[in-house]
Amino acid sequence: MVRAATHGTTMTDENTIREESDGVLDFIGQVSDQLRSRRAFMGDAAKVGASATALSALGAGTAAANDGGDSGNGGSSPSDVDILNYALTLEHLEANYYDQFLAEHSEEEVERSAVAQYFARPTLQYSTYQQIQDVRDHEQAHVEALSQTIEDLGGTPVEPAEYEFPYSSMEEFVALSDRIEAVGVSAYAGAAPMIDNEEVLKAALSIHSVEAEHQTYFQLLNLQRPAPEAFNEARSMEQVLPIAKQFIVGENDVPEMASATFENQTTDGSNVTVASAALPDGGFVAMHDSSLLDGNVAGSVIGVSEKFDAGTQMDVNVPLYSGVPGGDYDQSRLEEDQTLIAMPHKDTNGNGTYDFLTSGGEQDGAYTQDGSAVVDDAEITVE
């Protein structure tokens, strides 16, 4: 995603940070982010496969609004049907995800797993499978309700795509479920403000709250704090697209825009995980501590991922305080809770080594968009 590294600051290049006022201006900037980058958004939306219709339509509408187009009868801004089809696209993905899991795993297999043992109470431990069934049923109900509403409004519901989900164990399944539900919750929050019809908005918000309950359940199974923050950020369509594309068969194409999704998490301090990183030209994901916000660009680098080819990577592991060429540290792991900042970097010299520090910032610089470095921050809890 592209945004200020924290409230009130924007990365402008590898060596400077521009100070901005907080409050209303910061809020306007967040709203503007929902309406930016028409060409790149449309380019990615066209690649999402069977559900691209909804995403393309919504992208076109937000872009037109950004260009000052007529939001009235001209149809230049996204209609409620467009937005509902966008939501339906994500509900199709979620419904298929849980349906595939339940088709491939028995009740006994799930409830004898180490994950189910997290619950000491038998009534919780031995209802894990049923809870996943409930979540699947909820997602299918959302699909049916959204499809019916779209038809009632005179639209055509999008069809599901073919999906493939990367997990090979119960532990990986609950971690991915946590991730997918988090994306769904933030996607609804990002799209809801564009809905015009009050009744449609109420229905969308009722789905949003259930998705939040799903995420809380999987956060607990994933041994994460279920509600670490008082406020959660919304995701725009351009932030959701690279994540959704990862699960659609045949659609893992090279992204046109760089992005990073870095979520709050608990760690032992030796490493952190970046949920997704879109790297149009390949490269690395560097991890910065909060001294970056004071202008300490090079000195704030405390970790870097392996080198990736062009594409979108999921669950990027970033070791901390080790393996950074040119890095010199007096600690071996994160020692206290703090904010960290993920920043995708290019491999500008093509040698497969992160040379940003050793070159004094001349090589392997950060991906930028509209003159700002592409970053995302997260609150890291050290256990």
Image (tube, rainbow, N blue to C red):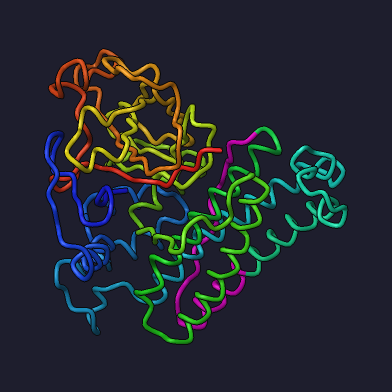
Vertical comparison of 245 with 15: above or below: below
Q: Residue at x 11, y 39 (%)?
A: 16
The furthest residue to the bottom = 198
Can residue 311 be spotted in the picture?
Answer: yes
Q: Residue at x 34, y 65 (%)?
A: 58
Whole-percent x, y for residue 89 in the image: 49, 60
Q: Closer to the camera, 275 or 102?
A: 275
Q: Residue at x 34, y 74 (%)?
A: 194
Magenta residues (range) = 142-167
Whole-percent x, y for residue 59 in the image: 30, 61
- Answer with the quarter of the image where residue 68 lies: bottom left
- Answer with the quarter of the image where residue 338 lies: top left
- Answer with the quarter of the image where residue 276 lies: top left
Task: Give yes or no for residue 147 being in the magenta stretch.
Answer: yes
For the image, the number of numbered tags is: 0
Q: Residue at x 14, y 44 (%)?
A: 17
Whole-percent x, y for residue 308 in the image: 37, 24
Task: Give yes or no for residue 279 being in the magenta stretch.
Answer: no
Image side of residue 333 versus residue 349, left or right: right
Can residue 63 be spotted in the picture?
Answer: no
Q: Closer to the camera, 251 or 28?
A: 28
Image side of residue 338 versus residue 345, left or right: right
